[in-house]
Image: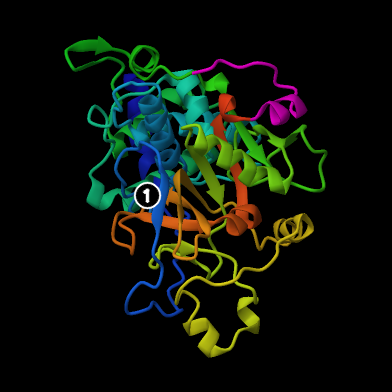
């Protein structure tokens, strides 16, 4: 191990050369007018238990924030104490597995801090989990730049292993790779004491968190693939090559509605690049007109109270996926449902961009937007209707 550290220290200057920030940064579209006062009035009609809003501070770690938040809600649903789980432990473990695939694919796959909601469950199965207070991973004010720099250093290292597969360090690359991560985000403990008990990450996952990753399912919707069958999720951040179930567009909101009504929250991945997804206003909907067909006055009034929405057909949704108008941008956590002053239903979505928007870190999203711009949803299988379960050929599931 000492020899690996010596070689690593010799290589680190090379990793630092030519760094480029390739973290996904969500540039929020604020060019459209925010009303002086909110013109939306919401009444929560379902508000399921969840932990407080966090702040990923611009780093491409939304998938870890959203899914760990989802697991925390699952703990609460199961009657357990909702420990805040370490988002960076999930990321650290995912980097190890991502590097394995990247090297074996000779670099022929995407590399970034991004990921998918299933990555957290996959890492939970392989490595366990731990409380945030045991392993925060970094100092919050500098995390974005630090993670961007670490991402570049790790990629450079993985590229070196591809170029020099017979080198001394390549034989034990995981130890060296871990050492780079430790230099940036600290060392994740193999054992720790928490609340007076000794744990490993695996035993903490089993004894204190208690979820079973095999009880969860990920769903997408594509018209160009058979419905109710598995398909490869063809997005760059699916570095683990996970397969998901394909359902109809109308099923997406039916599944979410049923889950929320029965006490199950939902992890949600979606496109947020459209100007009618407004973090500042805390609203996402699909206006009747395309933004390019709007007058300046209509653009100024985009969030000036509830509006009629465009009809979205499954073919419209697929076209947006095909031409990359809909891309896999961001992961969030659906925790409830609300209605506006006109009794129109919205989903209450917990984001991870701090609390400084109109609704203290939440965004209210219409069903039309969900149908149009969702890439995947993840939830407990028991939340599914018998009809959907039968179509997916799932059989019975663990009711917990």
Is 272 above or below relative to 378? below
| Residue occupying the far bottom of the picture | 296
- Read off the residue under disc 1: 352
Left or right: 30, with 345 as reference point: left
- Magenta range is 385-400
Whole-percent x, y for residue 42 in the image = 40, 59
> Quadrant location of the N terminus?
top left
Where on the picture, by quarter, is residue 282?
Answer: bottom left
Q: Is residue 156 magenta?
A: no
Residue 18: percent from the left, percent from the top?
Answer: 44, 56
Q: Quadrant of residue 273?
A: bottom right
Q: Nearer the viewer, residue 135 or 354?
A: 354
Determine the residue positioned at 58% across, 44% down.
Answer: 237
Up/down of 324 relative to 140, above or below? below
Secondary structure under tag 1 reads loop
Return the residue found at the far left: 196
The image's colouring method is: rainbow
């Amino acid at each position: 191990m000492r020899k690996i550290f010596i070689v690593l220290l010799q290589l680190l200057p090379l990793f630092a050369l030519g760094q480029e920030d390739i973290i996904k940064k969500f540039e929020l579209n604020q060019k459209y007018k925010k009303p002086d006062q909110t013109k939306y009035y919401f009444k929560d009609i379902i508000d399921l238990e969840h932990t407080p809003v966090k702040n990923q501070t611009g780093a491409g770690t939304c998938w870890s924030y959203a899914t760990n938040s989802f697991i925390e809600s699952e703990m609460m649903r199961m009657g357990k104490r909702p420990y805040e789980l370490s988002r960076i432990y999930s990321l650290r473990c995912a980097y190890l597995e991502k590097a394995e695939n990247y090297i074996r694919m000779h670099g022929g796959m995407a590399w970034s801090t991004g990921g998918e909601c299933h990555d957290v469950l996959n890492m939970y199965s392989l490595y366990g989990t731990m409380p945030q207070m045991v392993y925060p991973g970094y100092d919050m004010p500098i995390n974005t730049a630090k993670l961007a720099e670490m991402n570049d250093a790790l990629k450079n290292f993985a590229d070196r292993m591809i170029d020099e597969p017979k080198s001394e360090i390549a034989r034990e690359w995981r130890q060296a790779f871990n050492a780079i991560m430790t230099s940036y985000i600290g060392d994740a403990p193999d054992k720790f004491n928490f609340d007076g008990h000794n744990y490993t990450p695996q035993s903490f996952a089993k004894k204190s968190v208690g979820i079973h990753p095999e009880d969860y399912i990920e769903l997408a919707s594509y018209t160009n693939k058979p419905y109710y069958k598995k398909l490869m999720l063809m997005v760059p951040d699916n570095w683990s090559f996970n397969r998901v179930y394909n359902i109809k567009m109308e099923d997406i909101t039916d599944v979410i509605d049923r889950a929320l009504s029965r006490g199950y929250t939902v992890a949600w991945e979606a496109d947020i690049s459209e100007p009618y997804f407004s973090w500042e206003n805390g609203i996402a909907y699909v206006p009747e007109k395309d933004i390019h067909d709007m007058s300046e006055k209509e653009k100024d009034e985009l969030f000036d109270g509830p509006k009629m929405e465009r009809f979205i057909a499954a073919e419209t949704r697929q076209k947006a996926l095909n031409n990359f108008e809909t891309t896999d941008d961001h992961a969030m956590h659906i925790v409830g449902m609300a209605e506006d002053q006109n009794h129109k239903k919205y989903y209450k979505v917990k984001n991870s961009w701090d609390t400084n928007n109109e609704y203290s870190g939440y965004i209210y999203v219409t069903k039309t937007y969900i149908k149009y711009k969702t890439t995947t949803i993840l939830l407990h299988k028991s939340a599914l209707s018998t009809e959907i379960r039968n179509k997916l050929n799932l059989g019975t599931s663990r009711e917990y």
